[in-house]
Protein backbone atom coordinates (compact mmCIF):
# COMPACT_ATOMS: atom_id res chain seq x y z
CA UNK A 1 0.00 0.00 0.00
CA UNK A 2 1.17 3.52 -0.78
CA UNK A 3 0.87 5.86 2.21
CA UNK A 4 -0.75 9.26 1.77
CA UNK A 5 1.92 11.97 1.37
CA UNK A 6 0.15 14.34 3.77
CA UNK A 7 0.57 11.80 6.57
CA UNK A 8 4.30 11.25 6.03
CA UNK A 9 7.00 13.37 7.68
CA UNK A 10 9.62 11.94 5.32
CA UNK A 11 8.58 11.02 1.77
CA UNK A 12 11.41 8.53 1.17
CA UNK A 13 9.23 5.53 2.07
CA UNK A 14 6.30 6.97 0.14
CA UNK A 15 8.42 7.40 -3.00
CA UNK A 16 9.77 3.83 -2.74
CA UNK A 17 6.26 2.40 -2.26
CA UNK A 18 4.85 4.38 -5.19
CA UNK A 19 7.77 3.53 -7.50
CA UNK A 20 7.27 -0.18 -6.76
CA UNK A 21 3.68 -0.09 -8.07
CA UNK A 22 2.59 -0.91 -11.61
CA UNK A 23 1.75 1.84 -14.08
CA UNK A 24 -1.98 1.20 -13.60
CA UNK A 25 -1.62 1.36 -9.81
CA UNK A 26 0.39 4.59 -9.98
CA UNK A 27 -2.20 6.22 -12.24
CA UNK A 28 -5.07 5.06 -10.01
CA UNK A 29 -3.22 6.46 -6.98
CA UNK A 30 -2.73 9.81 -8.77
CA UNK A 31 -6.42 10.02 -9.68
CA UNK A 32 -7.42 9.46 -6.06
CA UNK A 33 -5.25 12.15 -4.46
CA UNK A 34 -6.90 15.10 -2.76
CA UNK A 35 -5.50 18.62 -2.94
CA UNK A 36 -3.68 18.43 0.42
CA UNK A 37 -1.62 15.49 -0.84
CA UNK A 38 -0.83 17.21 -4.13
CA UNK A 39 0.31 20.26 -2.14
CA UNK A 40 2.54 18.08 0.06
CA UNK A 41 4.11 16.44 -2.99
CA UNK A 42 4.72 19.81 -4.63
CA UNK A 43 6.34 21.22 -1.49
CA UNK A 44 8.65 18.18 -1.32
CA UNK A 45 9.15 17.90 -5.08
CA UNK A 46 12.38 16.59 -6.51
CA UNK A 47 14.47 18.23 -9.26
CA UNK A 48 13.08 17.70 -12.76
CA UNK A 49 14.65 18.09 -16.20
CA UNK A 50 13.01 18.81 -19.50
CA UNK A 51 14.48 15.58 -20.89
CA UNK A 52 12.30 13.62 -18.43
CA UNK A 53 9.17 15.18 -19.94
CA UNK A 54 9.72 14.85 -23.69
CA UNK A 55 10.80 12.30 -26.27
CA UNK A 56 12.83 12.46 -29.46
CA UNK A 57 12.39 15.44 -31.76
CA UNK A 58 8.93 15.36 -33.35
CA UNK A 59 7.55 12.63 -31.07
CA UNK A 60 4.47 13.69 -29.09
CA UNK A 61 4.54 12.49 -25.47
CA UNK A 62 1.20 12.13 -23.71
CA UNK A 63 0.90 12.94 -19.99
CA UNK A 64 -2.30 11.86 -18.26
CA UNK A 65 -3.41 14.43 -15.71
CA UNK A 66 -5.40 14.97 -12.55
CA UNK A 67 -6.02 18.35 -10.96
CA UNK A 68 -7.73 19.60 -7.83
CA UNK A 69 -10.79 21.03 -9.61
CA UNK A 70 -14.35 19.75 -9.34
CA UNK A 71 -15.21 16.30 -10.72
CA UNK A 72 -15.88 16.59 -14.43
CA UNK A 73 -13.19 19.24 -14.76
CA UNK A 74 -10.40 17.36 -12.99
CA UNK A 75 -9.06 15.00 -15.68
CA UNK A 76 -7.08 16.06 -18.70
CA UNK A 77 -3.94 15.37 -20.70
CA UNK A 78 -0.96 17.47 -21.64
CA UNK A 79 0.74 16.58 -24.91
CA UNK A 80 4.36 17.73 -25.28
CA UNK A 81 6.62 17.72 -28.32
CA UNK A 82 10.18 18.85 -28.99
CA UNK A 83 10.42 20.57 -32.38
CA UNK A 84 13.10 22.72 -33.93
CA UNK A 85 15.06 22.98 -30.68
CA UNK A 86 12.06 24.06 -28.61
CA UNK A 87 9.38 22.26 -26.60
CA UNK A 88 5.69 23.07 -26.79
CA UNK A 89 2.45 21.58 -25.57
CA UNK A 90 -1.32 21.63 -25.51
CA UNK A 91 -4.00 20.68 -23.04
CA UNK A 92 -6.45 18.01 -24.11
CA UNK A 93 -9.64 18.18 -22.10
CA UNK A 94 -13.40 17.92 -22.44
CA UNK A 95 -14.06 21.67 -22.65
CA UNK A 96 -11.31 22.56 -25.14
CA UNK A 97 -14.07 23.42 -27.65
CA UNK A 98 -15.05 26.25 -25.29
CA UNK A 99 -11.76 27.32 -23.67
CA UNK A 100 -9.37 26.58 -26.52
CA UNK A 101 -6.53 24.08 -26.57
CA UNK A 102 -4.35 25.95 -24.09
CA UNK A 103 -1.14 26.08 -26.09
CA UNK A 104 2.06 26.60 -24.10
CA UNK A 105 5.84 26.45 -24.39
CA UNK A 106 7.99 24.40 -22.03
CA UNK A 107 11.36 25.24 -20.48
CA UNK A 108 13.63 24.36 -17.59
CA UNK A 109 13.95 26.93 -14.82
CA UNK A 110 16.51 25.78 -12.29
CA UNK A 111 15.39 22.38 -10.97
CA UNK A 112 11.82 22.80 -12.28
CA UNK A 113 10.03 22.61 -15.61
CA UNK A 114 7.69 25.45 -16.52
CA UNK A 115 4.69 25.23 -18.85
CA UNK A 116 4.35 28.83 -19.97
CA UNK A 117 0.97 29.81 -21.42
CA UNK A 118 2.12 33.41 -21.98
CA UNK A 119 4.70 32.43 -24.63
CA UNK A 120 3.49 30.44 -27.62
CA UNK A 121 5.37 28.60 -30.35
CA UNK A 122 5.44 30.00 -33.89
CA UNK A 123 3.45 27.05 -35.25
CA UNK A 124 2.08 23.66 -34.19
CA UNK A 125 2.31 20.08 -35.45
CA UNK A 126 -0.04 19.41 -38.37
CA UNK A 127 -2.44 17.24 -36.34
CA UNK A 128 -2.79 19.68 -33.42
CA UNK A 129 -5.49 22.32 -33.01
CA UNK A 130 -4.67 25.67 -34.59
CA UNK A 131 -2.54 28.05 -32.56
CA UNK A 132 -4.84 30.21 -30.43
CA UNK A 133 -3.82 33.02 -28.07
CA UNK A 134 -4.47 32.48 -24.36
CA UNK A 135 -4.91 36.23 -23.86
CA UNK A 136 -8.47 36.54 -25.18
CA UNK A 137 -11.87 34.88 -25.17
CA UNK A 138 -12.82 32.24 -22.62
CA UNK A 139 -9.30 30.82 -22.85
CA UNK A 140 -8.10 33.93 -21.01
CA UNK A 141 -10.11 32.90 -17.94
CA UNK A 142 -8.46 29.46 -17.90
CA UNK A 143 -4.96 30.02 -19.32
CA UNK A 144 -4.38 33.79 -19.29
CA UNK A 145 -1.17 34.85 -17.54
CA UNK A 146 -0.55 31.29 -16.38
CA UNK A 147 2.65 29.31 -15.81
CA UNK A 148 2.52 25.77 -14.41
CA UNK A 149 5.59 25.07 -12.24
CA UNK A 150 6.35 21.35 -12.27
CA UNK A 151 8.47 19.16 -9.97
CA UNK A 152 9.23 15.43 -9.92
CA UNK A 153 7.45 12.95 -7.63
CA UNK A 154 8.89 9.66 -8.97
CA UNK A 155 9.99 8.55 -12.44
CA UNK A 156 7.21 9.35 -14.95
CA UNK A 157 5.11 11.21 -12.36
CA UNK A 158 5.24 14.93 -11.64
CA UNK A 159 3.28 17.46 -9.64
CA UNK A 160 2.59 21.06 -10.62
CA UNK A 161 1.38 24.29 -9.11
CA UNK A 162 -0.34 27.13 -10.95
CA UNK A 163 1.23 30.59 -10.98
CA UNK A 164 -0.89 33.32 -12.55
CA UNK A 165 0.45 36.77 -13.36
CA UNK A 166 3.47 36.04 -11.16
CA UNK A 167 1.40 35.03 -8.12
CA UNK A 168 1.25 31.41 -6.87
CA UNK A 169 -2.26 30.02 -6.59
CA UNK A 170 -3.47 27.14 -4.44
CA UNK A 171 -4.19 24.95 -7.45
CA UNK A 172 -2.26 21.73 -8.03
CA UNK A 173 -2.18 18.97 -10.62
CA UNK A 174 -0.31 15.76 -11.32
CA UNK A 175 0.85 14.18 -14.55
CA UNK A 176 1.84 10.66 -15.46
CA UNK A 177 3.98 10.20 -18.57
CA UNK A 178 2.48 7.51 -20.84
Image (tube, rainbow, N blue to C red):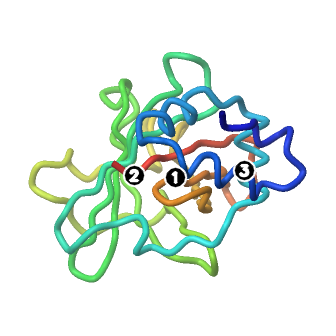
Residue 129 x, y percent position in the rendering? 20, 45
Q: List the single residue furthest toward the right.
A: 9
Residue with the mark numbered 1: 157
Residue 38 x, y percent position in the rendering? 70, 42
Packing grade of label 2 (10 A; few <14, some 14-19, many >=20) is many
Viewed as shown, does residue 131 lie left or right of 152? left
Q: Earlier in the sequence, mark 2 or mark 1?
A: 1
Viewed as shown, does residue 21 lie left or right of 39? left
Packing grade of label 1 (10 A; few <14, some 14-19, many >=20) is many
Residue with the mark numbered 2: 177
Q: Earlier in the sequence, mark 3 or mark 1?
A: 3
Residue at 62% x, 56% y is: 153
Q: Secondary structure at mark 3?
A: helix
Closer-to-camera residue (35/30): 30
Q: Earlier in the sequence, mark 3 or mark 2?
A: 3
Closer-to-camera residue (177/25): 25
Which numbered disc covers residue 41? 3
Q: CA distance from mark 3 to mark 1?
A: 11 Å
Closer-to-camera residue (43/157): 157
Amino acid sequence: MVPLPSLEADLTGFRAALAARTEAEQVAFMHGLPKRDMRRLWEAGLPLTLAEMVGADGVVVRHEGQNDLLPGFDRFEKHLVARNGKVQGINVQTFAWLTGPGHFTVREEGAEVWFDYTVLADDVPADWPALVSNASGLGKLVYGGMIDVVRKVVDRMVVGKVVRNGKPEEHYFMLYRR
